[in-house]
Image (cartoon, helix red, strand yellow):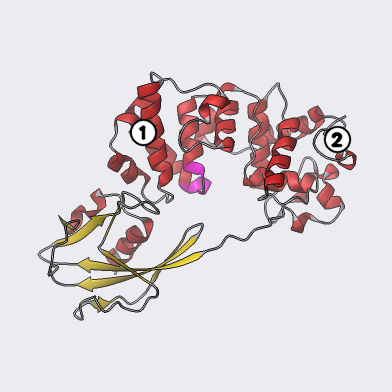
Amino acid sequence: MFLSLVLPNNFQFFPSMTDFHLLIADWYRLNHRILPWRETTNPYFIWLSEIIMQQTRIEQGTNYYLKFIAAYPTIQDLAKASEQDVLNNWQGLGYYSRARNLHFSAKYVVDELDGKFPKKYKEIIKLKGVGTYTAAAIASFAYNERCAVVDGNVYRFLSRVFDVSTPIDSTQGKKEFQLLADELIEKADPGTHNQAMMEMGSLVCTPNPNCEECPVQVHCQARKNDTIKERPIKSKKTKVRDRFFHYLVYSFDGKTIITKRTEKGIWQNMYQFPLIETESTEIPKSISKDAQFSSSVQKHILSHQRIFAVFHHIEAEPAKLESDYITINKEEIQDYPLPRIIDRYLEDTANQ
């Protein structure tokens, strides 16, 4: 029976998997957004779009996708580019490990796979930076392989339609939702099915859902049981760490100082002003008394960190040039990949 391998019998309320697929696929064909990466089966372009769109809004991600395919029209072009060039083009998207993994995997495909993008899920998932969701998306969209995608939108949609109370961030939950998605996907058209599942979560089954537009509303168990607001369930709260950055913005003879973040962690291989990290926004004693304390604190929120940054303006050359200091003309700073928090600071000061 339908879903008998996945969920208890009381979840068997669709006549068949085909009925579920047809309802959401028909809705998708009539209502989906026109997006450039949906107009191609080129696995390289699809891969680019999937990596770019992680943690990124459609509006912002589309511009970056178009920029990347213009700068690197083939995977060979991306592989030949320098990491600094790739990071420069990525600047503003955040989560820079995505760009580094993208570049690494492009070189791997060119050097180790003769420039041919892998064609099967089990091979695609071996690429650095590619997880189960991304591998399933590429395999189904480019090659029509029957691989069900499960992202945040799909978790929300399935948890409501089937009124699943298992936490989506638990080991059991991840397994249960993947099995459910695997059983729902149709062999005939897995690409459209996956797109429809994701689009339902993006446009209809949102955190504040528009149930009247849902093609499966009459079957929705969370709606029937009045548990929509409770789905999906998460068992864990992300622990957020506060960090306090004090940047030294030197200004002398039309020049300034930057350094490269070489340590592992956020913004690796990006460039920044010399930094002192402390336990609070209180001005460190080591900063010159001549420094002008900036009028505001920049705040930058990452998935597990809150960055509070204070920019200290020093109208002088450093008393000591550290080995990692790089002296540049002020106007050259945009030639270097910068964390978004510094890019935003430069935008703010330019408008003052």
Q: Nearer the viewer, residue 150 or 44?
A: 150
Q: Is residue 212 visible?
A: no
- Residue under pointer 2: 14
Residue 86 x/y as whole percent = 33, 40
- Under tag 2, what secondary structure? loop
Residue 112 in view here: yes
**Label 2 crowd (10 A; few <14 / some 14-19 / many >=20):** few
Q: Quadrant of residue 15?
A: top right
Residue 70 image label:
1
Give me the residue at 66% from left, 32% from top. 148
Q: In the structure shown, which secondary structural element does the residue marked by tag 1 occupy?
A: helix
Instruction: Please indicate whether residue 70 sits to the left or right of residue 35 in the image.
Output: left
Q: Where does residue 231 sit, x and y in percent of width and height?
A: 74, 54
Give the amino acid at mark 1.
Answer: Ala
Q: Residue furthest right?
A: 10
On whether residue 132 falls in the magenta region, the answer is no
Front position among marks 1 and 2: 2
Question: Picture quarter containing residue 64?
Answer: top left
Q: Position of residue 21 (x, y in %)?
A: 75, 31
Range covered by the magenta-colored residues? 52-60
In this view, the residue in front, 231 or 168, is 168
Residue 261 percent across, percent down from the top left: 30, 54
- Which residue: 80% across, 48% down? 163
In the rendered structure, are the residues bearing label 1 and label 2 in contact, judged by CB atoms less than 8 Å apart? Answer: no
Q: Residue at x 55, y 30 (%)?
A: 138
Q: Earlier in the sequence, mark 1 or mark 2?
A: 2
Q: Is residue 286 left or right of residue 232?
A: left
Gap in Å between the C-alphas at discs 1 and 2? Answer: 45 Å
